[in-house]
Amino acid sequence: MSTSTDDASLVARCRAGDEAAWNLLVERYSRYVYAIAMRVYRLSESDAEDVFQEVFSRAFQHLPQLRDDAAVRPWLAQTTRRLAVDQLRRSGRVEPVGDGEDLDGAAGEPGEDVFAQLDEALSVREAMAALPESCREILDRFFARDESYRTIAATLDLSQVTIASRISRCLAKLRAELTGSGRNRDAGASS
Amino acid sequence: MGHHKDTALDEERLAELIALLPPAPEAWVEAAQQLPRVERGVEQILALSEADAEFRRALTEDLEEAVRRTGQEPSEELVRALRERLGADSGGA
């Protein structure tokens, strides 16, 4: 999956002092870092916030020393994990919790499969960037923000039936994007 | 992402994966995005503090007021970063 700006060039731009690139990097990985802290390690809101800020603070400081610019994602994951474990120890909780209700992993130390799922989720998110804004918004509102049909319908001034059919259509588009058929079809379409 | 072609992601699975990444609170994201500006502010203030003994004293007496004197807003992030750096500097002295 290629993103509009790949990680390596984004990191290179950050290193050169490009603040817009830094904003984009934070935007791209904020959900990922948040999910590791909150959903994998089940930190409290305030501990998760400390970890979140510390991760990006370290990222900002260490970008110049990063050996492989394309490896920023595993670097962020590793740093978040380490800081989350430190936070758990400080707060007296011995074990991180890897039995999330929506992450498939065994209780206790989170397994690599949990992180693999988050990596996969992040790739799906990157694929969403290729969808029309209306699709990105509706999928994000319904699945990631857990908003109801009623709330989305009121916000977007659409009927609930329209919302339901759009979600279904947008999921199909996303699937096509991920399997490559979306690009082929779009290339052959006039609009 | 080649693995998706083999895995046959159905739409239900896609929905689950989207749900795994809810947004971080906006304030957290904004604070992280402020880091370059905060860092620049800290560097300016520390440089001034090295060059000006009176300003250095003012920093230890009332950090937020001293920051204001430089024309910068003493945001929570800037004040925290400054305290850390000043603490680290004095700790190493």
Image (spheres, rainbow, N blue to C red):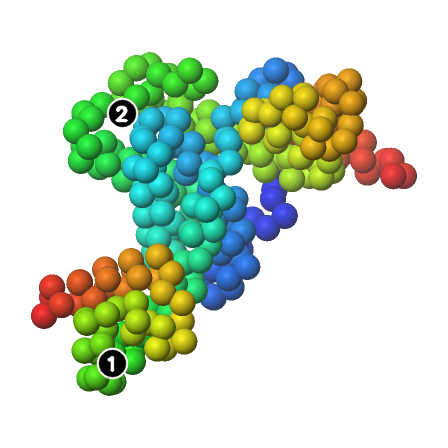
Residue at left offset 31%, top offset 43%: A50
The vertical placement of B18 against A68, above or below, is above
Q: Amino acid at mark 1?
A: Phe
Q: Position of residue B80 (x, y in %)?
A: 29, 58
Choose mark 2 or mark 1, whichever is in front: 1
Q: Chain of mark 1?
A: B
Label 2 crowding class (10 Å Cα cut-off): few <14, some 14-19, many 20+?
Answer: many
Q: Is residue A14 left or right of residue A67?
A: right
Residue where numbered disc 1 is placed: B55
Secondary structure at badge 2 equals loop
| Number of the label disc, if any, that sits on residue A96 | 2
Q: Secondary structure at mark 1?
A: helix
Q: Is residue B36 left or right of residue B67?
A: right
Q: Which residue is painted at 36% across and 47% down in the image? A: A53
Rendered location of residue A16, percent (x, y): 47, 66
Answer with the quarter of the image where residue A3 lies: top right
Q: Is residue B40 visible?
A: no
How far separated are the C-alphas under marks 2 and 1? Answer: 46 Å
Chain bearing mark 2: A
Residue sitting nearer the eye, B84 or B21:
B84
Q: Quadrant of the C terminus of chain A?
A: top right
